[in-house]
Amino acid sequence: MHPSRTGVCAGLVVCALIPCVFAADPAAEPERLDVSSAISRALKRNRHLARAAKLVQSRKLDVDAARAAFAVRVIPNTSLGIGDDNGIWDYGLRAVKRLGWGTDVQLGARVLGTELDEDTALHRASLDVEVYQPLFRRFGPLVHREPIAQAGSALQEARRRYEQQKADLVVDVVSTYEAVIRLERQITAEESFLQRADRLYRLTRARERQGHTTRVDTLRVELQRGQAALALESSREMLNTTRRNLAEQLGVPLNTVFALVPPPLLDMRLPPVEEAVAVALANRLDYAQALADHEDSRRRLRIAARDLYPDVGLTTRYERYGEGEDVSDAGRLDQEGWFVGLAAGRDFNPARDRVSVAQAEIGEWAAKETVSLTALTITRQVQEALAAYRRATTDIGTAERNETLAEGRARLARRLFKLGRGDNFAVTDAEQAYVLAQNRALSARAEASLAGYRLLRALGTLIEYPQELKAPDRTLHKAESE
């Protein structure tokens, strides 16, 4: 054999058999972890999920800010001025309250003083109440509570997005968890394969020296041994990367290594497609969000239609006041005045308002179509998830039987080669088929476990969502009838 080739192959074998020292602290005892604990830890400590929770809190503050427009506002009114001939001072308070119908109520108290000369001043004290009620265009809570409605819709959307992110995180954690277990078992199988390939290589070389095999046979076995070493190193590196991904999902240091407990396969009763779709529509938050968006668009259409009305408001004002040279004279409030009038708002542009209504109608139609499209998408996803679960649970049995057959074939091929009744090509081919069958069985096991969680995710029952975030039953019946 050429010395350089021998050195390269020997180096590959040595590298493959030496454990990776950079994966974790060898002195650290791996923490035992099952899949339920992993999911619970991820839901509590995942940093991306925590960021989404902060966004929900921000949306709650937006609702509080919108409601603050209906809180009582106190406006101080204080001023002091000095001119060439006199001085003027003014102080008072005004309380303003907006009601849901758009009514503005104002209560004010004021004292105004004017210095006429060095010894004389005129005082005026007043109490007044003023009410402004918009009519036609801006009348009623539909218009004036719209900022609160919009903030509430944004809050519900953020909450639904947060709950969906939790469900997605559960699937991701299970996927990574199963990938770690699969890679650990795959590495064990590949280590055994590399040891068998090394023994086969030594036996083939001995047979070559005895003249029972050719140089081509030896090179074939040597190549398989080198490929096995490379595959083992690749699997180890992939395992380290997957472990770091799992640690990140769980919110722990990246060098943390867990002793994972293989989870049992989910034993699920598969409902009929129609029943499964109904369950999904009742629980999926993306469908509930589509319905909520449609309702928001209908509300915006009603508001846009109100813009076709004139913007007129009714103003009423009643005042008790008093005047005198002394503050006590002004404080008697022995006089009164009142006012009733109409006030016009912004310019009236029917052409522009009709365009706004047309745009709102298109938005409402698009939102309604989105509801139908979302329902169709959910139906397709449920059907695919059901089919994938059935296929995965079936494939695992087939893959395990194939692994058993491939193992028996490889064992027989090795025995025949040792007895001189077979060639090493049959051994290498059988060994390669055995490794592939092992990997497929491991992948089928992981896919069968993950398919159950994906099905629950498609049905919207993987985690328990708050009831107020789901689609109302009456809305579901109405959507189905439409």
Image: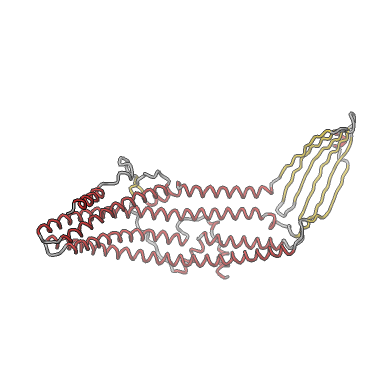
Name the foreground residue: 469 vs 307.
307
**Residue 19: percent from the left, percent from the top?**
27, 46
Residue at position x 23%, y 63% from top? 406
Q: In the image, is 163 to the left or to the right of 69?
A: left
Residue at position x 83%, y 47% from top? 318
Q: In the image, is 307 to the left or to the right of 430?
A: right
Q: Residue furthest bottom?
A: 481
**Residue 53: percent from the left, percent from the top?**
52, 49
Position of residue 48 relative to residue 110, above or below, is below
Q: In the image, is 435 to the left or to the right of 90?
A: left
Placement of the C terminus among the 4 image quadrants: bottom right
What is the count of numbered marks?
A: 0
**Residue 28: percent from the left, percent from the top?**
32, 41
Tell me where residue 154 sits by quadrant: bottom right
Residue at position x 57%, y 70% from top? 481
Q: Residue furthest left?
A: 210
**Residue 87: percent from the left, percent from the top?**
85, 33
Tell me where residue 256 sits by quadrant: top left
Placement of the N terminus among the 4 image quadrants: bottom left
